[in-house]
């Protein structure tokens, strides 16, 4: 569906909590080493939220920076979407808590669950609502406190994740093409390769469920790796075709920040290593926040400037995946 109105990102922001957990720190928590983690993932450190910080606190900090960057006041926001798999609680939505924290009293708010793909799904959802004329201004946030949902005794998963949030303000109007047409997909038949099986209506909270650690994230790392490389690579190609853009015309590729080896494999396949953005070394995998933080950093450090064509791509639990292209207009 072609957009009726052009839509652009007019401001970005991100926030990571103060506490840094290095690979060396992890050597004291599980049997691992800096060398093992860095060589297999490209990660050096990650940020960990304080006990009194929930996903909405991280998201609200990122949101305030994005609003300031956009020059938009909180009461101008019509819609807040928070992409998260680590919400403050099952309900109300984390987006409602963010609304209250930033004073966006005119917004309607909901959370979007697409695991690590959530920020891209949310961007496209907000874009389409603006394009259709239903709303004018949206705040899209990816926010995660992954540290509460990983098993700190499982070295296969706990080393991979970090906490943080990123945000973008979207508005009608764009000097260039703005946010273009996304390609997204899902495959629920592979859900059990990456999931948190306990704590919901399928396997409710009980002493037994907790004793079995079913409330923590479980992952078949090798399988996830293969699917992530294939899906992100394929979807980028599809998104470029859909928007009639050649890979050579793209200035910057920003993939989900899950593992530098996944990112390198996609770079090799597309032949774009010189234009691939990564900050996984500093933050590890912050799930739905990862793309949002990377986009903000790429804008702020000058990697992306006005008129650049940028490709975003994601992969996550579900499985879910997607890619989008945008022309940066600021
Ligand atoms: N430190 C030291 N050794 C470890 C660690 C660790 N932290 N974790 C596992 N090992 C050991 C294993 O026990 C195993 O030992 P064994 O051979 O004696 O049994 C050995 O290392 C190899 O384990 P593998 O799991 O096969 O290691 P692999 O090379 O596949 O790397 C990794 C694991 C890094 C998790 C990799 O599979 C990966 O990155 N997968 C993708 C994960 C990912 O990105 N998920 C998120 C994507 S979607 C989203 O963001 C939600």
Image (cartoon, rainbow, N blue to C red):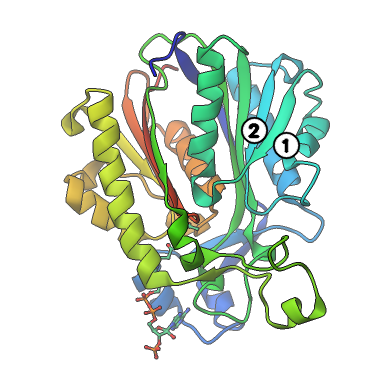
Is residue 324 positioned above or below 243 on the image? below
Q: Position of residue 132 (x, y in %)?
A: 53, 12
Closer-to-camera residue (46/84):
84
> Residue 149, position in %: x, y?
66, 65
Per the model, the C-alpha gap separating discs 1 and 2 is: 6 Å
Q: Using the rendered image of the protein, determine whether residue 251 is visible from the camera's viewpoint.
A: no
- Which label's residue is closer to the chain start, 1 or 2? 2
Nearer-the-camera pick, 149 or 69: 149
The C terminus: image quadrant: top left
190 to the left or right of 25: left
Residue at image location 72% in from the left, 17% down from the top: 73
Asked if ligand 1 lies within 8 A of label 1, the reply is no
Task: Determine which residue is flagged by label 2.
Answer: 81
Taking the image as shown, residue 188 lies to the left or right of residue 323, namely: right
Q: Residue furthest bottom?
A: 31
Q: Which mark is residue 95?
A: 1
Q: Residues within 10 Å of mark 2 (few under 14, many from 20)?
A: many
Circle 2 sits in a helix, a strand or a loop, which is it?
Answer: strand
Q: Residues within 10 Å of mark 1 (few under 14, many from 20)?
A: many
Instruction: Assign a secondary structure to mark 1.
Output: helix
Instruction: Give the residue drawn at x 27%, y 56%.
Output: 264
Residue 184 screen position, x and y as percent: 40, 38
Task: Name the residue located 50 percent from the left edge and 66 percent from the top edge.
Answer: 192
Residue 189 picture quarter:
bottom left
Q: Which mark is residue 248?
A: none
x, y percent for residue 143: 63, 46
Is residue 278 placed above or below 154 in the rendered structure? above
- Proximity of marks 1 and 2: CB atoms separated by less than 8 Å: yes
Ligand 1 is located in which of the four quadrants?
A: bottom left
């Amino acid at each position: 569906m072609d957009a009726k109105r052009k839509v652009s990102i007019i401001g970005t922001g991100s926030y990571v909590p103060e506490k840094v957990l290095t690979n060396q720190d992890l050597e004291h928590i599980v049997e691992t080493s800096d060398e093992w983690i860095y060589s297999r993932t490209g990660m050096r450190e990650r940020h960990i939220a304080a006990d009194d910080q929930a996903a909405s606190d991280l998201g609200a900090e990122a949101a305030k920076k994005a609003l300031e960057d956009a020059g938009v006041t909180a009461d101008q926001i019509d819609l807040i979407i928070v992409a998260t798999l680590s919400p403050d609680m099952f309900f109300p939505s984390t987006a409602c808590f963010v609304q209250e924290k930033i004073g966006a009293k005119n917004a309607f708010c909901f959370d979007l669950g697409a695991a690590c793909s959530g920020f891209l799904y949310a961007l496209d959802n907000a874009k389409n609502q603006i394009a259709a004329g239903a709303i004018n201004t949206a705040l899209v946030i990816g926010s995660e406190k992954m540290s509460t949902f990983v098993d700190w005794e499982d070295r296969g998963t706990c080393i991979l994740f970090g906490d943080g949030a990123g945000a973008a303000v979207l508005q009608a109007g764009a000097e260039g093409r703005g946010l273009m047409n996304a390609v997204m997909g899902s495959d629920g038949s592979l859900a059990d390769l990456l999931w948190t099986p306990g704590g919901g209506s399928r396997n409710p909270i009980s002493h037994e469920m907790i004793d079995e650690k079913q409330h923590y994230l479980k992952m078949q790392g090798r399988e996830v790796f293969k699917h992530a490389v294939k899906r992100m690579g394929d979807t980028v190609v599809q998104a470029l075709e859909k928007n009639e853009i050649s890979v050579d015309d793209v200035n910057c590729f920003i993939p989900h920040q899950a593992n530098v080896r996944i990112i390198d494999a996609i770079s090799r396949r597309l032949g774009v290593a010189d234009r691939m953005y990564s900050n996984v070394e500093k933050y590890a995998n912050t799930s739905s926040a990862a793309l949002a933080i990377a986009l903000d950093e790429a804008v702020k450090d000058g990697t992306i400037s006005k008129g650049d064509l940028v490709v975003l791509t994601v992969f996550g639990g579900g499985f879910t995946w997607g890619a989008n292209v945008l022309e940066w207009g600021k």
